[in-house]
């Protein structure tokens, strides 16, 4: 494993995160759109609508990120984070970057008074699932997730 440094981002990091975010979206079969990725990330950061953690390798190159959205759990009547995005560049996989990002996300959630983090991943993303489970994440066997597209 290679040393990876994790740090929170600021609005000035949008250009650094955008290529990783664009690659993340492509992983989930979206068309490449670097300008759109940059605009989306810049808005989240400028509006303080999410917390983004950035993974940097020894040469200070950005190799991964995770994005946390603050929300609430009505059942627990408490604030939580949804860890919606987690991505590590293919060249940096198996270096501990993903593990470090998840551990930093947990520490951030704790520091921000969140009682839980939720995430979803593709059924076929077994590598990520193994990582999550190795860090104590549990598969929800009680609730089933649904979504519905609505026209803007």
Image (cartoon, helix red, strand yellow):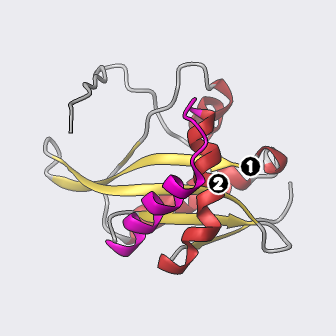
Sequence order check, earlier mark of 2 and 1:
2
Residue at image position (21%, 32%) is 151
Q: Is residue 105 visible?
A: yes
Q: How many numbered markers are drawn?
A: 2
Instruction: Say if mark 2 contacts mark 1, CB within 8 Å.
Output: yes
Q: Which residue is mark 1?
A: 89
Q: Which residue is mark 2?
A: 20
Circle number at residue 118: none
Residue at image position (35%, 70%) is 112
Asked whether 22 falls inside the magenta stretch, the response is no
Q: Nearer the viewer, residue 120 or 26?
A: 26
Residue at image position (28%, 26%) is 147
Main secondary structure found in the magenta portion: helix
Segment tinted magenta in the rendering: 28-47
Q: Is residue 108 left or right of residue 145?
A: right
Mark 1, secondary structure of its residue: loop
At label 2, counting other C-alpha atoms closer than 10 Å, the crowd grade (few under 14, some 14-19, many 20 or more) is: many
């Amino acid at each position: 494993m290679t040393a990876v440094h994790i740090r929170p981002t600021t609005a000035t990091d949008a250009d650094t995160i955008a290529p990783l975010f664009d690659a993340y979206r492509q992983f989930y079969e979206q068309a490449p759109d670097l300008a759109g990725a940059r605009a989306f990330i810049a808005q989240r950061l400028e509006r303080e609508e999410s917390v983004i953690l950035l993974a940097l390798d020894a040469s200070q190159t950005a190799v991964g990120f995770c994005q946390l959205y603050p929300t609430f759990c009505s059942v627990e009547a408490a604030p939580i984070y949804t860890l919606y995005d987690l991505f590590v560049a293919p060249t940096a996989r198996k270096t501990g970057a993903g593990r470090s990002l998840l551990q930093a996300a947990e520490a951030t959630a704790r520091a921000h008074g969140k009682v839980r983090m939720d995430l979803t991943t593709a059924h076929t993303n077994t590598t990520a699932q193994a990582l999550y489970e190795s860090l104590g994440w549990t598969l929800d066997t009680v609730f089933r997730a649904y979504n519905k597209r609505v026209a803007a």
